[in-house]
Image (cartoon, helix red, strand yellow):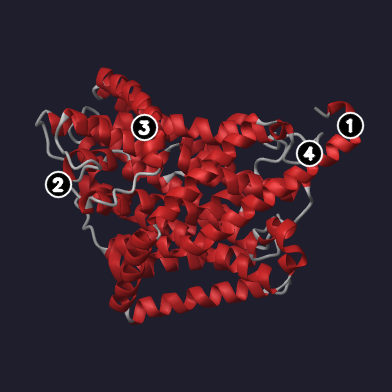
Amino acid sequence: MKKLTSVFIYSAAILLLLVMIGIVAPDTLENVTANMQAFISTAFGWYYLIIVTIFLLVCLYLFITPVGRIKLGKQDDKPEFTRATWIAMLFSAGMGIGLVFYGSAEPLSHYAVSSPTGETGTAQAIKDSLRFTFFHWGLHAWAIYGIVALILAYFNFRKGEPGLISATLKPIIGERANGKTGQLIDILAILSTVFGVATTLGFGAAQINGGLTNLFDIPANFFTQFIIIVIVTVLFITSALSGLGKGIKILSNTNMALAFLLLLIMFIVGPSLFILNIFTDTIGEYLQNLPRMSFRLAPLNEENRAWINAWTIFYWAWWIAWSPFVGIFIARVSKGRSIREFVFCVLLIPSIIGFFWFATFGGSAIRLEDTGIASISGLALEESLFGVFSNYPLGTLMSIVAITLVVTFFITSADSGTYVLAMMSSNGSQTPSNRIKIIWGLLLPATALVLLYSGGLLALQNTMIIAALPFSVIMILMTISLLKSLNNEVKEMALLHPKHRK
């Protein structure tokens, strides 16, 4: 039996302490996290906007320059998965529950509740609602995932380093990556991952509860969500023990099939022409306004700044908190891809799918609200999607498919998260022991439950934003490390092949 690593022991101890505080003093935990979150959003909003845009620019640089030809692995390595399965796996792990949770809720909120520009209920508000939703779920989000995944895959498969965050920093911190400094970095990555995944599990439990309330009048409360998380925990631990090539691969393909089915039904029964028109128009507005939105902080308008803190800063923190988990998982399934193919597929394909998803579900929700057929904006976030379904044909069928989709996304996220956490706390082993998987498989839902108990979704969001801040610094160092290593590799290639020098 393998000895537990110190990274695992320290990470688990910190999480157990948090769980105990959440059980004993939930109000204290909620107040502390809320105050810390408010300070970070206000004091570091500028920082988040700048670094996330820099990550996107670095990805574009890697795509258009000759380094894009470099493989994530040896030059003769072949991809382990087909491109379709690969995209399904990164999409399921990367967005998953969030797309279903916010599919109609976010565009509708921006249109009818709180507009990014302060103008609700107008034709311009419709455009703004989808433009900013695209902004939050588009190129910037996938650049955060993409840069972490690319760095991990490059150092793991091309340089032969272990699949750890700390190992990617060797070009700038040297052998300290193997010592206490490296352990601290990996512990921060694990904590960031746990809070990011726990937040998503909380969202998933709340939305499954919302769907069951809509269909069967099951009470929407913590007890119901507790039962949901316990049932799903058993399912995802079973999946996690089956291995990466079986459980997650099958679940990812199932997710894509269910998501496509739900999207197709909603598009057909919904306002199809309106969806196509608003999708096309908003794509143009998104691209045209991308630089402005990337740095928009509204320093002279308190209402708009509050909106940016609640939405944009929250999302950038969410993606950063998720990036070690999604990054390690995407890196693990991306061996053999070139940097150029990787950047293109990871940034562009999921973004376009997400844009059409939000145009379909958000557009259908806005159409109901704008024409006065139904008022969906008054519903809780986790219930809004089911409120939309109830006003269109095949609403019950779509609700059942959506609940099933959330469950499979839930299992995939937890399954992938369990594997990644076990890998990070086992010195980067590609085949971590089942014992470690089970322990993380229990700690993840326990963290989600405690945070739900202490303050619902708000406590989950607060904790995630707090965890993202220190890891964002590590991401900057990782990016510098990658660029330094790539620069050295290009110089070596030029020395070996003088004819390639220009």
Residue 368, label in figure? none
Q: Which residue is located at x 27 percent, y 38 percent?
A: 107
Instruction: Give the label, 4 or 2, closer to the camera.
Output: 4
Q: Amino acid under label 2?
A: Gly
Whichever of callouts 3 and 2 sits on the residue coming sooner in the sequence is 3
For residue 284, what is the image quadrant?
top left
Residue 497, label in figure? 1
Q: CA distance from mark 4 to mark 2?
A: 56 Å
Q: Amino acid under label 3?
A: Asn
Whichever of callouts 4 and 2 sits on the residue coming sooner in the sequence is 2
Residue 138 shown left or right of residue 311 in the figure: right
Provide the secondary structure element on which disc 1 rests.
Answer: loop
Q: Which residue is located at x 49 percent, y 53 percent?
A: 320
Disc 1 + disc 4, Cβ < 8 Å: no
Question: Which quarter of the image is occupied by the N terminus?
Answer: bottom right
* Residue 317 seen in render: no
Report the residue that reaches farthest toward the top: 273
Q: CA distance from mark 3 to mark 2?
A: 30 Å
Q: Which residue is located at x 51 percent, y 64 percent?
A: 470
Q: Position of residue 152 (x, y in %)?
A: 66, 50
Q: Amino acid under label 1?
A: His
Q: Position of residue 136 (x, y in %)?
A: 38, 42
Provide the secondary structure element on which disc 4 rests.
Answer: helix
Whichever of callouts 4 and 3 sits on the residue coming sooner in the sequence is 3
Question: Which quarter of the image is occupied by the C terminus?
Answer: top right
Q: Position of residue 306 (x, y in %)?
A: 26, 54
Q: Disc 3 marks which residue? A: 289
Instruction: Give the label, 3 or 2, closer to the camera.
Output: 3
> Counting other residues with Cα less than 10 Å from the Cα at mark 4, is it few (<14), some (14-19), or many (20 or more)?
some
Residue 490, label in figure? 4
Q: Amino acid under label 4?
A: Val
Instruction: Give the label, 1 or 2, closer to the camera.
Output: 1
